[in-house]
Amino acid sequence: MSSGNAGNFDLNELKRRMQGAVASLKHELGGLRTGRASASMLEPVQVDAYGTHMPLAQLATISVPEPRLLSVQIWDKSMVHAVEKAIVSSNLGLSPATEGQVIRLRVPELNEERRKELVKVAHKYAEAQRVAVRHVRRDGLDMLKKLEKDHKISEDDHKRHAEEVQKATDAIIVEVDRLLATKEKEILTV
């Protein structure tokens, strides 16, 4: 924490912690499968390869030739079976169609019910991150109260920093809402 007239109040540290909530949300929303193909869908797939677990992306080139098709070009022919097995056991609901060293994966359409479920899950993720951001804000405001009470900062500094904390909070909440809106649209319009 930086020192100076603000005691041990560090706005950048609070902002960094708030950004962590945005990063988490991006990751969680990225894992929600829509009916649209995306290379990131295969991120969780771990392959038993060369005596260890490896992410699929380290063994193949993943591309999206069509909106609902994934193509996995495996570099090492001896790994094709292991990759197939990993995709099937990853519970992503994708059935591999293999030709030589290329695996094609059709992404099934989502039915209406499944879409609504996914939207609910997305909202739950976003709300959890909003709560996390508000916790960071509360930590910052509590710290400022204590600093003023201990006469480490003036009342004016307290007010000014509290406004900065609120501004940072508002900006992050806007970002969370934007990510949610984008994902919701993606889920409902495929």
Image (spheres, rainbow, N blue to C red):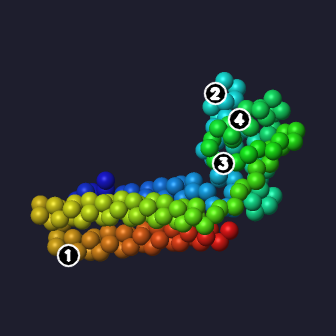
**In 3D space, how far apart are the residues under numbered discs 2 and 3 (Cα atoms)?**
24 Å
Q: Nearer the viewer, mark 2 or mark 3?
A: 3
Q: Secondary structure at mark 1?
A: helix
Q: Amino acid at mark 2?
A: Thr
Mark before the other along the chain sequence, 3 or 1: 3
| Left or right for 58, reference 23 | right
Q: Nearer the viewer, mark 2 or mark 4?
A: 4
Pick the residue in front: 127 or 106: 106
Q: Secondary structure at mark 4?
A: helix
Residue 96 in the image, given as x and y percentages of width and height? 76, 44
| Residue labelled with disc 4 | 85
| Left or right for 116, reference 124 | right
Contact check, label 2 and label 4, Cβ < 8 Å = no
| Residue at point 68%, 68% (across, down) | 190
Q: Farthest residue toward the right?
A: 100
Mark before the other along the chain sequence, 2 or 4: 2
| Residue labelled with disc 1 | 156
Mark before the other along the chain sequence, 1 or 4: 4
Disc 3 packing (10 Å; few <14; some 14–19; many ≥20): few
Query: From the viewer's perspective, is residue 26 above or below residue 104?
Result: below
Q: Secondary structure at mark 3?
A: loop
Pick the residue in front: 77 or 105: 105
Pick the residue in front: 119 or 182: 119
Evaluate whether residue 6 shows in this view. no
Q: Which mark is residue 93?
A: 3
Query: From the viewer's perspective, is residue 18 above or below residue 55?
Result: below
| Residue labelled with disc 2 | 52
